[in-house]
Image (cartoon, rainbow, N blue to C red):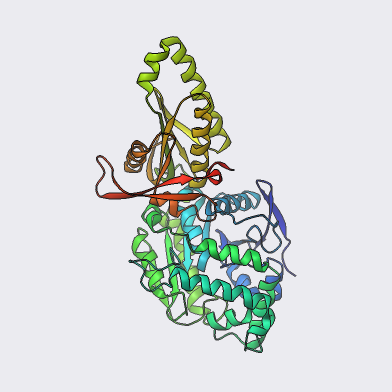
Amino acid sequence: MPPETRYAKSGEVHVAYQVVGGGPLDLVYIPNAAHHVELNWENPPIARFLDRLATVCRLIVFDKRGTGMSDRVAGVPTLETRMDDIRAVMDAAAADRAVLFGLGDAGPLCALFAATFPERTAGLVLMNSTPRFVRAPTFPWLPSRGEQEHNIEEAVLRRVDPSRSNDPSAARGFGWSVRTLSPDATDDEVKSFARVFHLSVSPGALAEYLRMNLDVDVCDILPSIRVPTLVLHRADVVRWVVRGGRYLADRIPGARFVELPGRNFAPAIGDQERLFAEIAGFLAEVPKLSSWEATEPDRVLATVLFTDIVGATARAAELGDRAWRELLLQHHEAIRRELARFRGKEIDTAGDGFFASFDGPARAIRCASRVVTAIRDLGLDVRAGLHTGECEVVDGKVGGIAVHIGARVAACAEPGEVLVSSTVKDLVAGSGIRFSDRGSATLKGVPGEWRVFAALGEEAAVQ
């Protein structure tokens, strides 16, 4: 019998999840693309894989919002929204800390979660994954954006019109992908995978999800991951080139890379013995590699926001001390309202400037945009700057080079502008926030040149 399906509440969205097994460690398994927590048990390869995984951990699986048995949603959830869903599922399953196991395009999500919430992450397993999906100078093996767009169109067309596939086993139009990525799957297994996928996601939602991935890039945050990490990659998987796995392992401190033989993307297809030996061995080591008791981390990935009033000195002289104090009080109240709305944490206030931190860059951008508008209503202009990076945590406050970069980015902003580093821009795929490239900037006291972007349009201010 399949396990009971339960629901966790993430904001206003119900996320379907299941808990299987009772091992000493909690493990959250997040598959590639879309799955269905109940239909997975009707797919023999996946059922066998999940059953075996549940022998070495307490296994937690869930359907991503918009797919499977979870609520359908408008638009494409950002990585930080998906992180909120992971935390909601962990809370509902009474999992204080867990190992995250991300397959394929779930890898960047799990990596970002581990860097942002190390106190909730016992370890990290990334399989057949990559930190980005579009070709770049450091990723010459990846398809170009144009090629990826063509692949997405083809995937959706095949999904809508199964007759486009010449493979008679390509059930409901998705079998061609299963056959390509996991060529050792039998005809019956191809049909089983295709059926689960067909009933998990609509063609339009699939297209939006895949297009969102084209803007994902977590390269800059990999050095911020401080949890035990195992990177697995089968050597001959089509499209998911093994160099992506090596890149992840090379840049995550202390990560162990294992190249497995085989050509099947799906963990449930192909050799299981070596795969489970590596997973079980890693899970056995996790309590030894990190403090099992949840403690406050001394380093964490955060988005920092700096704001300051443009021409504050001249305006204060114009108004006089009393009127300026009253206006400054309104300024502070307006910013604190927006920080509360977007889950920002006030770190420091010095005169007319604010310093705050966030656990998600899209929320930080939207908060900054709302602040600009709210302060303009007071007859003032502020400039705002944001950066995402690894911060030191001392007495609940963040510090370090990432904070200095955020302050320097803010100093480069024009009046009424929200300026962000390229790291921030790369992490908000799917948010709908548009940017204008402001080119490279030299940040005082920070080595090298930094690419900066201005957040544009109403999308930046909409929650």
The residue closer to the viewer here, 248 or 283, is: 248
Tell me where residue 313 appears, x and y as whole percent.
Answer: 35, 20
Asked if residue 451 lies left or right of residue 18, the reply is left
Residue 49, by quadrant, is: bottom right
Residue 154 visible in the snapshot: yes
Tell me where residue 96 appears, x and y as whole percent.
Answer: 56, 49
How many dots with numbers?
A: 0
Q: Quadrant of the C terminus?
A: top right
Residue at figure coordinates x 62%, y 89% from the top left: 166
Asked if residue 137 lies left or right of residue 179, the reply is left
Residue 69, by quadrant, is: bottom right
The residue closer to the viewer here, 100 or 330, is: 330
Tell me where residue 252 appears, x and y as whole percent.
Answer: 37, 59
The residue closer to the viewer here, 158 or 180, is: 158
Q: Quadrant of the N terminus?
A: bottom right
Tell me where residue 268 appears, x and y as whole percent.
Answer: 57, 77
Where is 244 relative to 450, above or below? below
Residue 278 visible in the snapshot: no
The residue closer to the viewer here, 452 or 25, is: 452
Where is 403 relative to 88, above or below? above
Where is 53 relative to 327, above or below? below
Residue at figure coordinates x 72%, y 56% from the top left: 6
